[in-house]
Amino acid sequence: MYGGIRTVYRPGFARIYELWSNTPGEQSFLSRPTITWLNVLLVLVFSLSLGLLIVAIHTNVQSLVILRQLFAVQESGLVLRVVTYALLVAAFVLLKVMYLSVMGYIFDVSSLVLIQYREFVRSLLFMGLFLPVVMLLYLVLNQTWPEGVLWVSNGVVSLMLLATVFRVARTVHRRSSLLNLHLFSYLCATEIIPLTVLLKLLIIAF
């Protein structure tokens, strides 16, 4: 899927995945609209990849109390479980802009919301390029080294989420210093707390 998108949308694909570049192209991306067909398509592919990896690593979806209360997912419904996780991830990514808008209004930093959200989406999508590699690693080593590959897979997902938070914090810091306690509190409310919840649901619960 990633290869097909890269072939069809080569210029847009390159703009998104030039993550570590400090050229004017990076600033140009942060000034463009975030909700485009290409970005939505990439978010869906990322969500499907992460959902597949989560289901592969943690096959017992019923152990998640929150999901058990919201969704009646059968243990044997592999495809349904992957789609459920993918939809939850996609909803989290696409709807986070609403949460950021509310928190930006509360903390009076609304001017940073769109920049923060664009960096969040691009960073997450960039980290998502490693998910197929992790999935292949899991499939190759799961039979011979099941306990070790579980730690590696969980570690990669955790590092991906942490790297996204650090990247967003770096971009926000360029526009307004995080040494400001007010802004630091806003970043904790919008990035650190959601990260903690995700790690609790995806990693620590298992």
Image: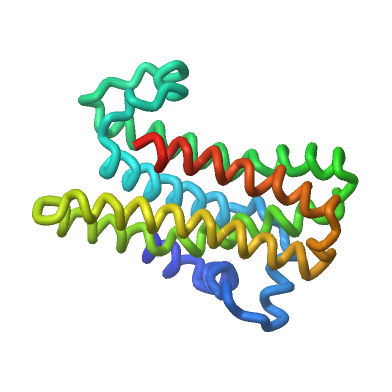
Image quarter of the N terminus: bottom left
For residue 72, above or below residue 91: above
Where residue 85 sits: x, y (%)? 41, 36
Where residue 151 sits: x, y (%)? 30, 53
Please name the residue shown 73% across and 51% down the image.
187
Q: Is residue 195 visible?
A: yes
For residue 86, above or below residue 174: above
Q: Is residue 1 visible?
A: no
Please name the residue shown 86% across and 43% down the image.
107
Pick the residue in front: 106 or 184.
184
Seen as rendered, the residue at the extreme left is 144
Pick the residue in front: 88 or 190.
190
Please name the residue shown 58% across and 76% down the image.
20
> Dividing the picture into quarters, in which one does residue 102 lie?
top right
Where residue 27 sits: x, y (%)? 73, 73
Pick the residue in front: 90 or 184.
184
For residue 28, above or below residue 115: below
Seen as rendered, the residue at the extreme right is 108
- Horizontal placement of 188 versus 183: left or right? left
Seen as rendered, the residue at the extreme bottom is 23
Please name the residue shown 77% across and 66% down the image.
173
Colour pattern: rainbow
> Dividing the picture into quarters, in which one does residue 141 lie?
bottom left
Where residue 108 sits: x, y (%)? 90, 46
Image quarter of the C terminus: top left
**Total number of numbered labels?**
0
